[in-house]
Image: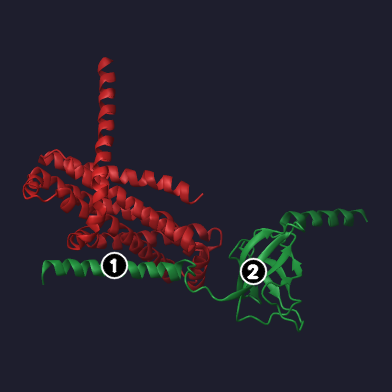
Chain colours: A red, B green
């Protein structure tokens, strides 16, 4: 009994300590943002690592998600004799929810885990201390470019995901299932609003990017410097970032679309 | 090829594809009108019931788009709905005695304003009011009237 209460107390204290550490981490990073933007060469390398290398998975996933949406939407809407609305349905669900969320989940798995492993290993092999010895601030030259790169890359990837998803839906419904192409585009055009839908979807992607970047680098920087510690931190990055994205998505949706 | 160049080319391609996607979403998917709003002039009309009409609903003549609803407000004097419409400037010869009615596209579609062209020599100017209006069909009123006429018919 006493043991159970003690373990509850210990885990709550650990949780509180984790939140405090995360807050300190963010507090340390914030003043470095303006300087980080001007280190273009470091930034470009990290955008390449996080963004360009995630492109294949985003492209494939976007196409298939759009195609499945087209198929399912057509199947359901056919019972109401309104197959033309499948364009609207595909576009709205991609722009509002699936684009930012699925792109963020894939990004957390593909780029977030890589960042944690990279930074965690740098830490465990004492590279951070070595940088500090050379009077190079690792927060400024290692962590900050990676955070900024995530925030730059994910919104772009989300937009690519949405565009390809809509194209995938178009190929399936118009090319294969015989929905009228004019009705597909014009209904979509009438019902999708630039400000209410597209901009809000974009804002979602930016928020998810910040979350994933912070979780991934926090886990990397504070990983236990053993191979097991790094592997655990990598797992935690994917789990925490994915759950965080889904939870935040619910909150953002309830603010934006009600 | 240096490593830095490879990174730069990759990032450049990524940005390019993202830009193309955004432009595609803006122009083809959403109703982005943004920077080049077509020049238009405003006229208004009073309706006793607008049904489900919303701002940005189309204004059509014979099914052709000639403008959009700018805003809908309550007229403080007559307590009727005042619908302000933007009519595109190229349609500047609409007669004064034209009539507008609120119609529905399809059985369950969205509502729009249909403009029936009159025969007056005077044309609508910016700020003019269209006096001949027909309100939206409200299903409950229609059924109510149908019930009345049915019961009256039964009594005879």
Label 2: state its secondary structure.
strand
Q: Is residue B51 visible?
A: no
Position of the C terminus of chain B, as image quadrant, is bottom right
Identity of the residue drawn at 29% across and 19% down: A5
Horizontal placement of A149 versus B138: left or right? Answer: left
Disc 2/disc 1 C-alpha distance (Å): 40 Å
Q: Which residue is mark 2?
A: B85
Identity of the residue drawn at 86% across and 53% down: B151
Q: In the figure, residue A55 lies in which quadrant? A: bottom left
Identity of the residue drawn at 76% across and 84% down: B121
Tell me the tag on residue B15.
1
Image spot of residue B142 (x, y percent): 76, 58
Q: Nearer the viewer, residue A236 or A14?
A: A14
Label 1: state its secondary structure.
helix
Instruction: Please state which of the two labelled residues, at mark 2 or mark 1, is closer to the viewer.
Output: 2
Label 2 or label 1, whichever comes before in sequence order = 1
Image spot of residue B136 (x, y percent): 71, 62
Q: Is residue A202 above or below residue A184?
A: above
State the residue lying farthest toward the bottom: B121
Identity of the residue drawn at 38% across and 53% down: A204
Number of numbered markers: 2
The crowd level at tag 1 (other Cα within 10 Å; few <14, some 14-19, many 20+) is some
The crowd level at tag 2 (other Cα within 10 Å; few <14, some 14-19, many 20+) is many
Q: Are marks 2 and 1 on the same chain?
A: yes
Chain under numbered label 2: B
Image spot of residue A63 (x, y percent): 34, 63
State the residue lying farthest toward the top: A2
Q: Is residue A173 above or below residue B151?
A: below
Q: In the figure, residue A223 lies in which quadrant? A: top left
Chain under numbered label 1: B
State the residue lying farthest toward the right: B156
Horizontal placement of A159 versus B53: left or right? Answer: left
């Amino acid at each position: 009994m006493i043991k159970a209460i003690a373990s509850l107390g210990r885990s709550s204290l650990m949780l509180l300590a984790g939140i405090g550490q995360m807050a300190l981490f963010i507090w340390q990073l914030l003043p470095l943002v303006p300087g980080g933007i001007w280190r273009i060469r470091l930034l470009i390398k990290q955008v390449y690592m996080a963004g360009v290398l995630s492109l294949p998975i985003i492209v494939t996933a976007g196409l298939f998600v759009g195609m499945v949406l087209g198929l399912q939407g057509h199947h359901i809407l056919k019972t109401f004799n309104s197959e033309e609305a499948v364009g609207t349905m595909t576009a709205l669900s991609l722009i509002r929810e699936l684009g930012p969320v699925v792109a963020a989940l894939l990004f957390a798995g593909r780029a977030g885990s890589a960042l944690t492993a990279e930074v965690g290993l740098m830490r465990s092999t004492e590279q951070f201390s070595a940088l500090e010895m050379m009077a190079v601030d690792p927060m400024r030259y290692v962590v900050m470019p990676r955070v900024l790169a995530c925030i730059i890359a994910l919104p772009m990837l989300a937009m690519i995901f949405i565009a390809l998803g809509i194209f995938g839906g178009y190929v399936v419904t118009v090319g294969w299932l015989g929905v009228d192409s004019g009705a597909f585009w014009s209904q979509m055009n009438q019902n999708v609003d630039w400000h209410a839908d597209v901009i809000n979807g974009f804002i979602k992607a930016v928020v998810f990017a910040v979350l994933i970047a912070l979780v991934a680098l926090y886990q990397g920087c504070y990983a236990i410097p053993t191979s097991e510690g790094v592997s655990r931190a990598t797992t935690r990055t994917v789990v925490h970032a994915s759950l965080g994205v889904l939870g935040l998505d619910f909150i953002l949706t309830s603010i934006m679309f009600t | 090829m240096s490593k830095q160049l490879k990174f730069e080319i990759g990032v450049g391609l990524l940005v390019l594809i993202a830009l193309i996607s955004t432009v595609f979403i803006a122009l083809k998917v959403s109703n982005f009108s943004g920077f080049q709003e077509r020049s238009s002039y405003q006229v208004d009309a009073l309706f006793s019931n607008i049904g489900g009409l919303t701002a940005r609903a189309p204004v059509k003549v014979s099914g052709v788009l000639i403008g959009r609803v700018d805003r809908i407000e309550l007229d403080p004097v007559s307590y009727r709905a005042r619908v302000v419409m933007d009519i595109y400037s190229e349609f500047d010869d609409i007669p004064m005695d034209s009539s507008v009615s609120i119609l529905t596209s399809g059985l369950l579609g969205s509502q729009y304003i249909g403009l029936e062209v009159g025969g007056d020599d005077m044309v609508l100017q910016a700020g003019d009011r269209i006096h001949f209006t027909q309100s939206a069909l409200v299903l409950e009123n229609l059924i109510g009237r149908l019930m009345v006429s049915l019961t009256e018919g039964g009594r005879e």
